[in-house]
Amino acid sequence: MATTRELIEEYRKRRDKILQMGGAEAVAQQHQRGKLTARERIDYFFDKGTFTEIGQFVRHRTTAFGMEKRDIPAEGVITGYGRVNGRYVVAAAEDYTAMAGTFGEYHGIKFVRAINLAKEQGWPFVGMNDSGGARLQEGMDTMESYFWLFRAQDMASGIVPQIALLMGPCLGGQAYHPIMQDFLIQTRKTGFMGIAGPAFVKTQLGEDISLEELCGWKAHAVKSGQTHIVAEDDKDALDKAKELLAFFPSNNREKPPRIKTGDDPARTSPELNDLLPDRSTQPYDMRRILKAVVDDGYFLETLKDHARTVITGFARFNGRPVGIWANQPAWASGVIDCDAADKGARFIRFCDLFNIPVVTFQDCPGYMIGSQQEWKGILRHGAKLLYAWACATVPLIAIIIRKSYAGSHGGMLDKGMGADFEFAWPTAEVSIVGAETAASVIFAREIKEAPNPAEMRAKRIAEYRRLFENPYCSAERGYTDDVIMPADTRKVINQALDVLENKNEGNRAFNARPWRKYANINL
């Protein structure tokens, strides 16, 4: 019978072997690829000395294909909890040095237990993805474990924030794990995600394409719109995850954390009075307005390179986190197309789930028209924005900068769609259509039959513009709460947020919501 000393020594040997991960050679190869090891990522991410590992001694049970002889430290994934900037977070970091971090039955079970812990404790979850994919030697057990994980993620969705970090390969069924989380951060050189890798694509479709082109950051941050933030390397990805977490509450029952700021909430921005071009067809960069009015000019943008006609991201007003949804006139006039609508709707719904107020900055000529957008389903995609606004219960504030026409007026947030407050600059053009379009419809016959059609057309356009292309028609009806000086925008937003601090939809008898599971959004 072993002595206590011998048992403790055996424990130390077992633990030390696990902490060595895949061994010195595998660790060196990981570093040569420009990546940290899973344990280095954990150490860098969590406040020093606060991480508690769970499931360190978990081991697979597979015996097929010689697997009974394979030792996979910690089952290729480190799971546990600790503090990040003082607040509890649960994490799972895949270990590429241990059998390439492949996803097997107990690898998945560890993930599930970590996510369930996060849900039950009300703590955010962060997944650090770096895996060779499914562990095929475990067959059906691997596949079933994937589905346990996907369901666990769904059950935690909307309860705790979930962030995925793509720090290495993530292909096949493995890729559904990060894509189902709230935000995805991808490293520029080492992060790859795809439903199938290049070899499989070549075999099945005959398409010859590189891993970088098929699954790299451009594929998802620019084209597919699945990567929210691009990071330079592992440490940058972990830092950006911390930045995101700082805007979020730990769970859906809490308000987002408010911080102290030295930026006067009543500060004016006189430069905004002269920022807009005199002609409404001239572009400008909306980010200049955003940075002028938010606390300390700090704006954390998401999906920056995708659907660039609109802007989403997080900022603070008087220390309060807010979500920002804005048009970008410097890119295709800030029009809303299918991708832009999807980008905005998902962002609004996330903010609503986690009690983050949303402020919109509008300068939009409308939804994109034409055959290509029509066939892609612009009506269906555009309706997602309407559903998102109508279902939202957080404080909603709209600022109309310049154009706000037709359906896009609702898509960018309107009183009728649920805005608590709507303000307009004197430069705002709030109308069902632009003057040129209106004149061509209303006065088509008159213009055609006039002695001088061009002169008559110009006259009718000017008349329509004078009557309707301004903020005052909307203000006269009470649809717009006030017309404000651009310089006062920050002050007005902060005052509105003060009033809406304890907004409670349940107290609004006029806007009482009937019981239902959820709205049948046009996905």
Image: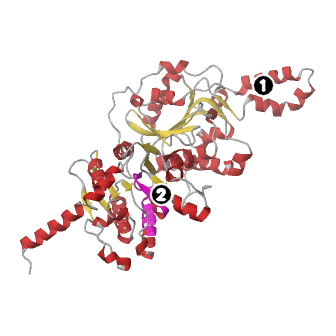
Is 348 in the magenta?
A: no
Q: Position of residue 47 (x, y in %)?
A: 25, 47
Q: Which mark is residue 180?
A: 2
Q: Using the rendered view, name the quadrant where residue 332 is placed.
A: top right
Residue ID at (57%, 28%): 482
Q: Quadrant of the C terminus?
A: bottom right
Question: Which residue type does callout 1 highlight?
Answer: Ile
Q: Which mark is residue 461?
A: 1
Magenta stretch in the rendered image: 146-172
Whether residue 195 is visible: no
Given residues 434 and 504, the one toward you in this image is 434
Residue ID at (72%, 48%): 374
On screen, residue 73 versus residue 507, left or right, reads left
Given residues 9 and 310, the one toward you in this image is 9
Residue ID at (61%, 62%): 205
* Numbered label tally: 2
Is 150 in the magenta?
A: yes
> At numbered mark 2, what does the secondary structure look like: helix, strand or loop?
loop
Question: Which residue type does callout 2 highlight?
Answer: Met
> At numbered mark 1, what does the secondary structure look like: helix, strand or loop?
helix
Q: Position of residue 237 (x, y in %)?
A: 38, 45
Residue 202 in the image: above or below residue 263: below
Q: Which mark is residue 332?
A: none
Cα separation, mark 2 vs mark 1, equals 49 Å
Whether residue 253 is visible: yes
